[in-house]
Amino acid sequence: METNEKKKVVLSAIQPTGTPTLGNYLGALKNWKNMADDYDCFYAVADLHSITVRPEPAQLRRRTLEMYALLLAIGLDPEKNTVFVQSHVNAHAQLAWILNCYTQFGEAARMTQFKDKSEKHPENVNVGLFAYPTLMAADILLYQADFVPIGVDQKQHLEITRNIAERFNGLYGDTFTIPEPFIGKAGAKIMSLQEPTKKMSKSDTNVKAFISVLDDTDTIVRKIKSAVTDSEARVYYAEGKDGVNNLMGIYSCCTGKSFEEIEQEFEGKGYGDFKAAVAEAVAAELAPVRDEFNRLIADKSYLNACMEAGAQKAARVANRTLRKAMKKVGFYQL
Ligand code: ATP
Ligand code: LTN
């Protein structure tokens, strides 16, 4: 990239709802890291989003710090990128309110994540859960993001963001950049190791269904060994072979090998050899992240200093967009 060319802007965020899984890592975080050099990147811990499921306060505090440490542990450089906590930048909640008023009830009600989560937690279908996508739109639009690296499950939220931004721009003239989703090919949807038709999720009650990015090598080996496959004992990609397809996807993401290369590598071999190789590749991928996390989490004052600097950098950019949007809407300016 030419040095005098303005870098394109990337924004993404992850909720501090638990230790990220291999799915979060391969589907989202690894792309964050890959984009870190070529783009002007803003990466947030989405703590405002996470209170839609009412976490225990001490747990939310701890998980926010851990998620922040983890973002640095995957190799994001807090000097080069802007790594921050969403609730530290007031503009997110402020712009989200404005965007609520430019979003139709019907379009928010169509969000599949809202429908899924309300079914899963019928006892707490709160307005925040419903307004989740407008807060996410605010996260993205405040930074005038060109690209948003996400897993495929978040694509609909990106579409509603684009619709809201286009509507606002249509009414008031150019205010927001229209963002594009960036969805990696292989890691877009890593499936549960136990029910490979369901996505791998950190909130799964069965811990054998997911690999956490902080799992040690023995645990990784054990979980992959017990991953559900099929009775055919041949490694190839095909419809209906969900368990094997998923392990091939994971192996491909960790090694960079194509599906054809993987099929060749395991020609004439059974699932035992295949699973051992997948486990080894995953363990090699995650070991440096785990080591760096353990080092960073012991240094709270460093993490706090990075958070503070990140929030200041983010707020400068976010407040500029917020002021612009408020002016266009007609709020009285002092
Ligand atoms: P939860 O399980 O608590 O609902 P989650 O595991 O889906 O959460 P999020 O914080 O909602 O995690 O997602 C963070 C990022 O990881 C998003 O970009 C999302 O698209 C991506 N992601 C989540 N699960 C997967 C998966 N199984 N495969 C690929 N990407 C994923
Ligand atoms: N909704 C996302 C997390 C998230 C996000 C964002 C992702 C919050 N704000 C802005 C991209 C851009 C999730 O649950 N995966």
Image (cartoon, rainbow, N blue to C red):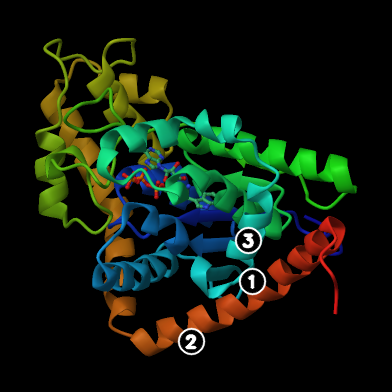
What is the residue that sits farthest to the bottom in this orientation? 301
Q: Residues within 10 Å of mark 1 (few under 14, many from 20)?
A: many
Q: In the rendered structure, which amino acid carries the disc numbered 3?
A: Cys
Which residue in the structure is indicated by mark 3? 41
Nearer the N terminus, badge 3 or badge 1?
A: 3
SS at badge 2: helix
Q: In the rendered structure, which disc, 3 or 2, sits on the residue that comes first in sequence? A: 3
Q: Is residue 262 visible?
A: yes
Secondary structure at numbered mark 1? helix
204 or 238, nearer to the observer: 204
Q: Position of residue 50 (x, y in %)?
A: 39, 57
Query: Looking at numbered disc 2 in the image, what kind of residue is underneath it?
Result: Ala
Q: Which residue is at a point 60% across and 68% down the rendered structure image?
A: 81
Q: Is residue 15 visible?
A: no
Residue 307 versus residue 1 in the image, above or below: below
Work out whether residue 276 or residue 179 is closer to the camera in this orientation and state it. 179
Classed neighbour count for the residue bearing mark 2: other residues with Cα under 10 Å, few (<14), some (14–19), many (≥20):
few
Residue under circle 1?
314
Residue under circle 2?
Answer: 305
